[in-house]
């Protein structure tokens, strides 16, 4: 199983002491997460005001900081529509990246997802297909790019714990296709986080953990940072 650390996400930097608009601080978090057992890293580059951005200048800053702290560890970024609502603008930004990430997530329910994924593929950047809902799963299953994806992210939203398994099974059925063998990463957020991680372990799927998905440890206490979340996840996966 591959365990990815999702270091910050779109969370406001004021919500946790280990969230920051400073790439050097997040690079420290990245190194600590890798030392705790993370195999890859997902980060949201931010501008000095703390807003997510895809702008080449900031992506370069963040990638270089994280790669310096974690050499040889794959690093991915977001292409979420909230960074730039117009899909054609996101395509142009991808084409303008000076330093390319190893992979980037594309939320398949967003307008222009195919175009953004196509721009990533043209540059040799791995595509993480983010599937949040059934309609997105069906759209991805019909996509000519589906076999070109690095992996599929089944992203369970903040739903009650008792609803997680049913939702996960439903989405998995929609994206699994015998002719297209794409690795699947299952994860949740907030209330669904730890239930989804345990299901991923049971089903032999990749998964992820970090301050993007939750600020809380399995027992409900507040995590000190990404490393503590990764260590807790490693313990659950080993069990």
Image: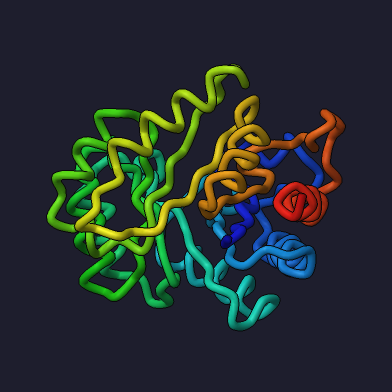
Tally the marks.
0
Q: In this rendering, would 90 be left or right of 130? A: left
Up/down of 43 relative to 109, above or below: below
- Quadrant position of residue 4: bottom right
Q: In this rendering, would 93 be left or right of 169? A: left
Up/down of 138 relative to 2, above or below: above
Where does residue 127 sit, x and y in percent of width and height?
Answer: 34, 60
Q: Residue at x 84, y 31 (%)?
A: 219
Q: Residue at x 19, y 61 (%)?
A: 118
Q: Is residue 93 visible?
A: no
Q: Is residue 178 visible?
A: yes
Q: How is the image coloured?
A: rainbow
Where does residue 137 sit, x and y in percent of width and height?
Answer: 28, 37
Which quarter of the rendered picture does the N terminus lie within? bottom right
Where does residue 82 sit, x and y in percent of width and height?
Answer: 40, 39
Q: Residue at x 62, y 67 (%)?
A: 39
Q: In this rendering, would 131 be left or right of 64? A: left
- Quadrant position of residue 200: top right
**Along the line of sight, which residue is nearer the eye, 68 or 194?**
194
Q: In this rendering, would 153 be left or right of 26? A: left
Q: Residue at x 28, y 36 (%)?
A: 174
Where does residue 41 sit, x and y in percent of width and height?
Answer: 58, 63
């Amino acid at each position: 199983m591959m365990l990815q650390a999702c270091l910050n996400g779109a969370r406001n930097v004021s919500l946790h002491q280990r969230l920051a608009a400073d790439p050097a601080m997040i690079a420290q978090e990245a190194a600590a997460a890798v030392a705790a057992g993370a195999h890859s890293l997902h980060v949201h580059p931010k501008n000095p005001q703390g807003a997510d951005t895809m702008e080449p200048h900031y992506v370069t800053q963040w990638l270089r900081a994280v790669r310096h702290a974690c050499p040889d560890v794959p690093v991915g970024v977001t292409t979420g529509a909230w960074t730039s609502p117009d899909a054609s603008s996101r395509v142009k930004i991808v084409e303008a990246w000076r330093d390319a990430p190893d992979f980037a997530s594309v939320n398949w329910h967003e307008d222009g997802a195919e175009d953004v994924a196509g721009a990533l593929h043209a540059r040799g950047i791995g595509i993480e297909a983010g599937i949040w809902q059934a309609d997105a799963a069906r759209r991805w299953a019909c996509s000519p790019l589906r076999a070109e994806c690095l992996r599929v992210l089944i992203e369970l939203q903040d739903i009650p714990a008792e609803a997680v398994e049913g939702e996960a099974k439903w989405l998995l059925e929609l994206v699994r296709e015998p002719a297209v063998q794409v690795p699947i990463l299952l994860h949740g957020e907030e209330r669904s986080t730890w239930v989804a991680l345990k299901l991923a372990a049971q089903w032999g799927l990749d998964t992820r953990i970090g301050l993007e998905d939750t600020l809380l440890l399995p027992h409900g206490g507040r995590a000190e940072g990404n490393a503590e979340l990764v260590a807790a996840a490693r313990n659950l996966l080993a069990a």
